[in-house]
Amino acid sequence: MRIEKMSEKYRDEVLKMSEEFYSSDATSHPADRETLINVFETAVSGFPTFEGYVFIDGNGVIAGYSYISQYYESEIGGMCVMLIDLFVKREYRGCGAATGFFEFVKREYSGAKRFRLEVMPDNAGAIAAYRKWGFSELPYKQMIMDV
């Protein structure tokens, strides 16, 4: 499996996977198409702290995608890398695509002091995989305010 930076040529496939991801039980709410388009366009625009990646199998077929956002986190005194929308197509699950992506992220963002992601509390399979990679749960609840 190779990891490639997202580009315009992947628009249709990534948007289709994004729609599948946001209509699954891996998320707490759906996302409208306009939002998904905006996210994709930001990822391929060269925005300095937000990038997208696709996972491509040996036959050149996209197996999944994810976005990466970077920010400074004061509680650790350094950069944090947030893995966003980590999605692998059903037929590639259990084949190492997500593990390969995380290994890539650790290499490419080796200066980060923390890697972070979100997971639904009842997504036992994802939680088990993330724990295997070394993730642990945070002891606090996050809050948001959309504007």
Image (cartoon, rainbow, N blue to C red):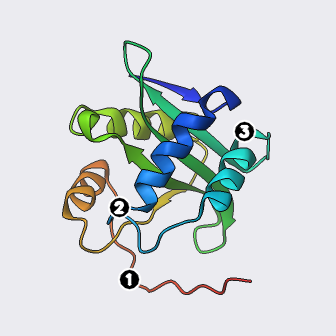
Q: Please state which of the two labelled residues, at mark 2 or mark 1, is closer to the viewer.
A: 2
The number of discs equals 3
Q: Which residue is mark 3?
A: 44
Whether residue 136 appears in this view of the structure is yes
Question: Residue at 61% across / 41% down in the picture?
Answer: 52
Residue appearing at x 35%, y 61% in the figure: 24
Point out residue 96 in the picture as x, y percentages from the top left corner.
28, 33
Q: Amino acid at mark 3?
A: Val
Image vertical order of residue 23 relative to residue 90, above or below: below
Q: Earlier in the sequence, mark 2 or mark 3?
A: 2
Residue 130 relative to residue 29: left or right: left
Q: Residue at x 42, y 21 (%)?
A: 61
* Mark 2 and mark 1 residues within 8 Å of each other at the beta carbon: no
Label of residue 53 in the image = none
| Residue type at tag 1 | Pro
In front of the other: 76 or 100: 100
What residue is disc 1 on? 139
Q: Position of residue 143 (x, y in %)?
A: 55, 87
Numbered label attached to residue 24: 2
In the depicted structure, whether residue 81 falls above or below residue 57: below
Q: Alpha-carbon distance for marks 2 and 1?
A: 26 Å
- Where is residue 109 drawn, in percent x and y? 58, 41
Q: Quadrant of residue 4?
A: top right
